[in-house]
Structures are given as structure tokens and as C-alpha cells.
Image (spheres, coloured by chain):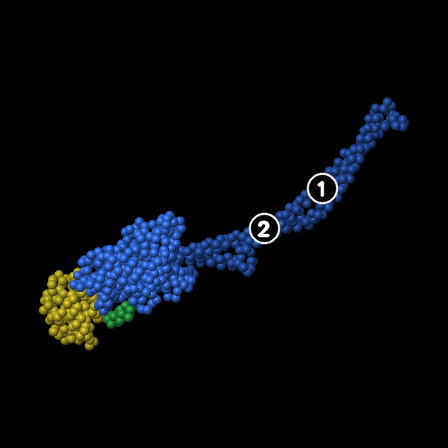
Amino acid sequence: MKQETHRKLEQMRAEVGRDYGKLVQKLLAVAFLETDVQKLVERSTQGIDLEMQIAGERCVFEVKTSESNSIRLSAKDFEGLDRLVEDGASVYIAALMNGPLESWILARYTPGEFPAGKDLSSFPFRAHRDSDLERRILTAFDRVVDRDVHTAITRRQGGMDEVLQGYPAWGRA
Amino acid sequence: MNAYEDLEAKVRARGVRVEERLAILAKLQRFDGGEQLAEALDQHERSIEEAAAKVRKVIR
Amino acid sequence: MSGERFPIRPVLLIAENFRGLAKEHSLDLDRELTVLVGRNGAGKSSLLVAMEWCLFGAEATRKSDSGIAERGDWSLAYDGAAGDVRVTLELAVEGGLARLTRCRTAGGKARQEDDLLLELSDEEVLRGKEVQDWLAWNQLPDWKAWKRSFCQHQELSRARVTEAADRSTAIAGMLGLDEYRKVSDDLKKLKVKRLEQRATEELASLQGDQLRALERPGLELRDLENQLERHGVAVAQAGEAELERRTAALITSAQGLAGRLGIDDSGLPDADGPAAELQKWAQRWPTEVRRMLDVLSRERGELAGRVQSLGASFEALEPARRAEADSRNVRDRLATELGSVDGLRGQRAVLAEKRTGLEAERQRRDALGSLLRDAVAVVKDAQAPDRCPVCDQDRSDLERAIQAKLDERAPDSLEGEFADLDARDAKLQEQITKLEEAGAACETNQRKVRALEEQVRGQLPVGASESASIDELQRGWQEDVRRLGLQCEAGEAHITQHRGDAEVVAILAKLRDARARARVAAGELTETPEFQELQGVIDAAAGFASDLEALGSLARQLEDERSDERIASVNESIDSYFSMIVGASQRGRVRVQPKKTATKVSYQLVDERARVITGLMNQAAFNALSLAALFASAESRARQGLPQFLVLDDPGQNLDDAHQAGLASALATCAGFAPVLVATIPGALAEALSKADAKDVRTFSLTRTDDGTGTLVREA
């Protein structure tokens, strides 16, 4: 991720406060929409933030952002993810830590691989990262932040929803 | 079924990094497996330090 | 690694000078149950501990290692023993026997390494670390496992039920879960968190570096740009293309000079090669050129010297030749005029002969004169001077006549001839001298000419014709000297030029790197190959860490699952032994309760109401529980085919007679699974053991010798 992207996200964090995580999630959704995903839906159920079809496969993402370079997933989060795996979905944890050298880690989730209720750095997720998927959104995310961060800062979630609605593959849950 | 066979079946059932984990399991069965794994751990640590040193050189 | 294996067991113990045992004592152990009966101080414990020392050495006898405080003050050697302390344990192994011997030399210090050797039935002998490896490979216990599952000491009897780790490990062993636990423990030892910590620290450090780099002003860039301007390079053109062009020019120029000076140019770098190599070469190159110029300069100096020397030699040759010819002419002319030296010397010889004749005449005349002078004197002295004194004749003129004769024969009359001869001889000598001098001068000149000719020939290249090509040669040499001079000048000029150009190239390269760093600092670090590589190695380390953690977690999960499956039989075993010792009324009192956490599985011993049982027990029950756990563990290990034997030192302590009878029964039962060696004082337990329902029992009585200084071992 470019330094400039970090700088803009930091600026957004300073401006939007608690909305930061949700707005980053929407920016990530836009980045996915800029690649060739089919039907991307934003959800707010346990263990799913984004759901999309990639090459005909059902992929769900739990998006986690952090200010302190660690994230925590509760046993309930894992239960939700376990159910999705049982349903046959490809489940990912999308983690973005804070810092100029950090980038999105999209880690494939398998039940039993991550401990619940613990602060986790990006390290344990690296073992399961899907580099192809990460490459797919890397430049798109830089571009989207560059273009849409102003909307996110000034018009918050409503503004970002409008951006999302501009993509044919976007759909509401 | 001994513990190692039992574990092998579990690793296969989970289906994550199967080859790598079976290789480690095979080492654990060896008399000097612990030493080999400790050496591998050291090697990973050294690799991180060396790669970080290269990045540091780029920055400085 | 469970499965069918040969049950390794001890069959013979030999101890010499060990603790309370003076000299050598042996104990046949090849029975299911071996009982040692003796009063306090008879040497029972010494025999049991001898086996421990043989297997574990200092670990079993040092306070810090053994965990047994009283062993800290132990002296291994029998008090007053002069010989070595030696214990041999003979083990029945698959295919024969193995003799394990540990020896400490007499007077050896406590910290001294013992001699440890193992003689195998195929005559192979292992020593030291090899023995330890053999014991481990054959799954004989280490000291910790021994304390947990092989022995009962008064000092340690409670730890296996009170110490959580010991208890859990012992129960895991009973459940046949040693291997699962071993996997967990081996993985725990690896401290896998270290990798995450290292990666996190390095990334944090780099992040700090990058933040500082972002803040760093562009002073470095400006300084480099100023340096370029001082070299006449406009900043606007100071880009990658200019660097490439100048680098290529630097190398082309070097190639040109190399060709001109005959320097091997295979070491010249590629223009698009690594910058560091190019820099090193650019610094090194003037030295290489200088070395070559030194060679050329020396060559030039030598050649110039040769031209000068040849010229000088050649110039000196002609006058020498002329002088030689002149002297030869003089010599020849004199020879013509005067004849040969030998001829003249012949003439001188003739003159010398003549002189010799004259000398003889002069002597004759001198003698005659003397006579005549004598005669005159006689005549003068005669009384008649006119008469001859001889013939007495009248000789009035006698004196005159004699005088006349005297005068006539005077030597002076020969002087003229002598003078003539001498004059002629002197002339001849002079002529000879002239001839000789002319000859010598001629020879000297000839030698000089020959030497000069030799000198010239020596300076000519092989095969060169002296007469024809000297001029040509000299011209050629002079041309070479001139050419070498030009090469040296060109080399010097090249060095000066190269230094300037190389400096510009170095500054351009520094500027490029500084601009790259500035770009990196401005946010492109994560796109550099170096950062990508770091990501790769951290990902690999994370994979490795994940594998180790997942395997540990799976091992614990499996231990948990399998313990659920097997716990009933272990409960039955412990409960059975416990009730055997304390009475049937206590049946169903003890059971194992697993406790699971994310990182470990531990086990507690609880009663039928799930209360921790150790908190509820009296001393006797406590001992009984410890022994029951030991027997259950031994039985379980034996059932799994693992090496197992039990060594118990006075296990009936704190038990009443009824409990001791129960203990004897439990020992006999356990001995059916694993050999048991038990030491006890005479009393209820010894009595009960003698009547125990065991098929294969042997009892030894231990007594002090009559003088009280040793132990007697007799089969009862």
C-alpha cells in the first residue's frame, strides 16, 4: 500500500473517529468492485462484513481494522465463521493494521487455526494469506482511497453508499 | 494407532498446510527431530533479521 | 511409538564400594518380584540407590538435580573404601543381555564425570553420550520419568499425586498419552512466539526508520547536486541516462587505454553491472594503470639506456680501431727498419761474447802488469841496477824496457773497445725496447677493440648483424623509446581524466540512490524487492509458526479426546490398586479428572464427588494413593509394551498391618505386569510378601557382617 494511501487513511481516522472501521470496509468494498467480482453485498451479521462472488465462488470477509496493531476475534465471531465454512463458503479475514508498512492481509479462515478472544497481530494471519486475492485489490485500494477518501470524510457512510451504488455488482443485503 | 498416526489423520482432515505439517510431524518422530526443528526456527529468525537488514539499507 | 516391543528389564545388579556396601555385592533380579528384607542400616537403600546411580549418575545423587535434599550431602563411596565405586546393571534386552556400568574412580571429585559404558550382546561397546542415546532410544526412563513412574522413595512418595506437572504427566502415561504429550512438550520447547516477536520488532523498527527517513530534509540531494555543478554537470541532465552514458564512456575509455597499453581488459566491468562493483573498479583502475605505466616507464628507461650505451660503445669503437691500426703500422714499420726483436737479441749476444773476450784480455794484461811492476821493483832494489839480477848480464835499460813493456800492456788500451761494445749494445737494447713497446701498444689497442666489439655485440638483439644494422637498430630503439614515452604520457593523462570522470559517475550514482531513497521514504518502500523479500520470509516464518502451533493444538485436542476414551480403564486401575491397599470399602473412591485449557491438558485426582482427593486424606491414605498411582502407571506402561520395572524403598511406612497386607497383594498384582524390587524391614509387609500370591518371588535377607562393617546378602 502506498504511503500516500496511509496518509489519507490516517487523515480520515482523525476526522471520522468511530466511523473509521466501517468507512475502511466500504472503501475495501469499492476496491473489490473495481476488480471483476460479481455481486458484492455488505452485511452486518455475525462473522460477515462483505460477501461476494469471485469466479463463481462464494467468498465472505470479516473485515478487521486496528489502531493498535492487533485485532481480536471472539468465540462468537469464530462460531459464525465456522458456520459459513460448513455452508461451503470461502471465508476470509481481511485485516488492516495501523502503520506505514502495513497492507491488507486477506487470510483464508479454517476452523481451529486461530485462537479466540486473544489480541492477534498480523503474524498469525500471514500463514494463511491469499496473495492472489491481495494483489487483486492492492492497486485498486490505493486508487479508491485516493479518489473517494474525501467523500468518506465529508459525507461519511451515506456518501460511500452512494459511491457503492454506482457499481452494477453492488447489492444490498 | 499411535499418537503420530493419530495426528497425521487429524492434519489431513483439517486440510491446511498438510505437507508442511506432516513433514514437521515426521521430524518430531525422529530422535533428533527437536534439534532439527529448533534449528529451522533459528533459521527463520535469522532470515527475518537478514531481510530486515536489507530493507533498512534501502531506507538509510 | 507404542506397539509390541521386547520388555527390557533388569536381571542383575552388582555394586562395589557403593554407599553402605563394602566390596562387591550382587543381586539377582530376574524374578517378577524381588524382596529385600533387612533392618535399618543393613544396606537395602544402598542397593536400590545403586541402581539409580547406575542409570542416572549425578542426577540421582546431587541435591540440585535429584530434587532430594538429603542427597546433597551424600558420599558415594563406602566409608574407608580404597577402590573405585562401580555399579553394573544387567538388562535383558531383545536378543540377549546388555551390561550397563557406571564407575567413579577412587578419590574422584563429586563434579567429576563418571565413566559410563554399555556392553551389548553383539560385543559392541557404547560409552558416555552414546549410552544415554541408547537408553533414550530404548525408551528407558529419564530421571524425571523414573521418579514419576518407576520408583517409590520415602522422600518423593507424594510428589506424583501432589505436584500438578508430575501428576498430569504420570496420568497421561497411564492413559497411554505420553506421545501426544511429548509432541506438545517438544513443540512448547521451541518457543515459537519468538518468530512473531522478531517479525513484529523488525517491522516496528523499520517503520520508525521510515518515518525518520520521511522527515529527513533533502540536504543530501542538494549537496550532491552542488558537487555535480562543481564538475560542470548541469543538475537538469543528472539522470539515469547521463549516469549510463558516463559509465559507458568511462569503461570505453578504459578499454581504449587497455588496448593501447596491452592491459588485460577482461576485468573491466559491464556498464550495466552492479553499481557497487563499478565503484570499486573505478577506484581501483588508476592503480592498475599506474602499475602498467610503471612497467612501461621502466621498459622505456631500460631501452633508452641501451640506446645510449650502444651509441657510446659504438662511438668508442672507431677511434679504438684507428689507434689499433696506427700502432700496428708503427710496430710493422719498426720491424722493417730494425728487424725482429729476436734478431736484435742475437746481435746483443754476439756483442756480449766479444765483451767477455775483452774482459779476459784485460785480466791477462792486469796479471802481466803486476809481474812487470814486481820486476821493476826488483830492478830498482837491485845493488847493480844495470845488471840483470837473474842472469847478471848488463841490462842498463832494463827498467825502461820493463816499463815500456808495462805501458805496452796497460789495460787502458782496451777501454776504447769496451766503450764501442757498450755503445753498440745500448743501441741494440734501445731498438729492442722500441720494438717491444710498439708491440705492446698494438696489443693493448687490439684488446681494447676486441672488448668494445664484444660490448657492442652484447647489446645487439640476437641475430642482428653488427655492421649492417646498428644504425637501423638504434633508430628502431629510439622509435620505441619515443612510443613508450607517448604511452606513459597518455596513461598519465588517462588517470587524471578517469579520476575526474569516475568522481562524476560516483556522484551521479549517489544522486540516483539518494533520489531512490527519497522516493522510498516518500512511500514506495513496500514496493521494493527488498521489502517484498522481507514479507516473504515473515510469511514463511508465520507458516512455520502456524504449523508448530497447530500441531501442538491438535496433539492436545487428541490427548483430550483419547483421554476421554481411556480414562475409565485408568480409573479402574488406580481405584483397584488403591482399594487393594486401603480396603475394599474404599472401592470407587478415586478417579481421574482431566482439565483442559487452550495450551495444556492437566489431570487431577478427585473423589466420587469430584473433590480434589489429596486434600481429604490422612497420611496412610496419601501413601496408598501415591503407591496406587505408581502401580497403575507401571501396569499401563507395561501393557503398552514400554520398559517398566518398579523399585520401592520401604513402601509400607505409615501403613498399618492391614494396609501392609493389602500393599503386598497390590505389589504381587503389579509384579505380574512389571518386575518389582522392593526393600522392607522385617515385619508385616515382609511377612505378607512371603505369602503373597505371586508366581515368581525371590526374597533376600540383608544383614550387617559380624564386625558391623559390611553387608551380607543371602537368599532367604
The answer to whether any part of residue C94 appears in the image is yes
What's the residue type where badge 2 is placed? Lys
Closer to the camera, C108 or A56? C108
Q: Residues within 10 Å of mark 1 (few under 14, many from 20)?
A: many
Residue depicted at x 21% and y 70%: A110
Image quadrant in which you'd find residue C265: bottom left
Chain B in the picture: what colour?
A: green
Query: Which residue is the site of mark 2?
Result: C448
Number of numbered discs present? 2
- Residue C33 at what x, y percent from top left? 32, 62
Chain C in the picture: what colour?
A: blue
What's the residue type where badge 1 is placed? Asp
Chain A in the picture: what colour?
A: yellow
The answer to whether any part of residue C601 appears in the image is no
- Residue C158 at what x, y percent from top left? 24, 57
Query: On the picture, is C394 further left or further right than C511?
Result: right
Residue depicted at x 72% and y 47%: C343
User: From this viewpoint, which residue is outermost toward the bottom?
Assistant: A56
Q: Chain of mark 1?
A: C
Closer to the camera, C226 or A155? A155
User: From this viewpoint, which residue is outermost toward the top?
Assistant: C383
Closer to the camera, C25 or C134? C25
Q: Chain of mark 2?
A: C
Q: Quadrant of the C terminus of chain C?
A: bottom left
Specify the label residue C425 is tagged with.
1
